[in-house]
């Protein structure tokens, strides 16, 4: 897949757990999610009382702006994946449609949580490698 720029694309908690081999014990620790973007990892974890802060430059934008960017890039990514299905392992996700639906569900959960999470300091606009978070 070729993309000219970084795009908002988000996974859910169960995918994060599998991707990073996170145990229930790991999730009890304080977590810094780097480049979480519009994933629902933070939203789902904090809902169940866990302690997580996500940093990503996408958080300089408000929810309306992020939603409109998601709506813009979603069809492009789906079309690229559909053209290159043989480049992916379809084991945990059955097909392109199921992947699109899982990503959209995760991003909608993120968007529903974003304003509140930003207010409470769970979504911070920082770009790696800089990780200075100023709390005034
Ligand atoms: C494709 S999304 C993946 C989101 C999430 N990690 C997931 O797996 O669902 C990549 C994210 O990396 C973020 N990103 C790109 N450059 C970054 C940087 N220098 N520091 C932190 N995040 C960055 C983008 O803004 C974007 O939200």
Image (spheres, rainbow, N blue to C red):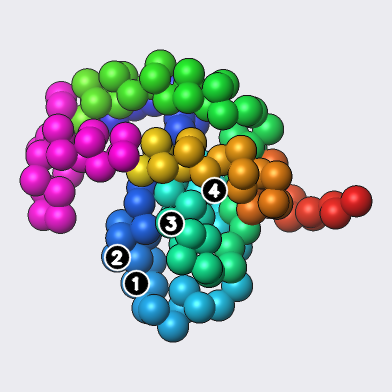
Which secondary structure is most common in the magenta stretch?
helix
107 displayed left or right of 83:
right
Q: Can residue 43 be seen at all in this image of the molecule?
A: yes
Q: Secondary structure at mark 4?
A: loop
Mark nearer the viewer, 3 or 2? 3
Instruction: Check if mark 1's residue and mark 2's residue have beta carbons within 8 Å.
Output: yes
Q: Earlier in the sequence, mark 4 or mark 3?
A: 4
Q: Residue at x 23, y 34 (%)?
A: 100
Which residues, given as a range, are shown in magenta? Answer: 82-105
Separation of residues labelled 4 and 3 (CA atoms): 16 Å
Towards the viewer: 7 or 39: 39
Q: Can residue 19 be seen at all in this image of the molecule?
A: no
Towards the viewer: 50 or 134: 50
**In the image, the residue with mark 4 has its CB under 8 Å from the nearest atom of ligand 1:** yes
Instruction: Tell me, for residue 44, which label it has, or none.
Output: 3
Q: Secondary structure at mark 3?
A: helix
Q: Residue at x 21, y 30 (%)?
A: 81
Q: Earlier in the sequence, mark 1 or mark 4?
A: 1
Q: Which residue is mark 4?
A: 35
Q: Residue at x 15, y 49 (%)?
A: 93
Separation of residues labelled 1 and 3 (CA atoms): 17 Å
Q: Position of residue 91 (x, y in %)?
A: 11, 54
Q: Earlier in the sequence, mark 1 or mark 3?
A: 1
Residue 98 location, quadrant? top left
Towards the viewer: 72 or 7: 72
Q: Secondary structure at mark 2?
A: helix
Instruction: Tell me, for residue 21, which label it has, or none.
Output: 1
**In the image, the residue with mark 2 has its CB under 8 Å from the nearest atom of ligand 1:** no
Separation of residues labelled 4 and 2 (CA atoms): 17 Å
Dot 2: few (<14), some (14–19), or many (≥20) neighbours within 10 Å?
few
Instruction: Tell me, for residue 18, which label it has, or none.
Output: 2
């Amino acid at each position: 897949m070729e993309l000219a720029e970084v795009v908002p694309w988000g996974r859910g908690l169960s995918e994060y757990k599998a991707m990073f081999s996170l145990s229930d014990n790991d999730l009890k620790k304080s977590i810094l999610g780097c480049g979480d973007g519009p994933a629902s990892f933070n939203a789902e974890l904090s809902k169940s009382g866990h302690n997580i802060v996500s940093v990503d430059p996408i958080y300089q934008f408000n929810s309306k702006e992020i939603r409109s960017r998601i709506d813009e890039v979603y069809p492009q990514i789906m079309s690229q994946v559909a053209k290159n299905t043989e480049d992916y392992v379809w084991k945990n996700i059955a097909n392109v449609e199921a992947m699109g639906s899982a990503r959209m569900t995760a991003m909608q959960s993120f968007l529903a949580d974003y304003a509140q999470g930003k207010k409470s300091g769970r979504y911070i606009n920082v770009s790696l490698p800089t990780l200075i978070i100023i709390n005034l």
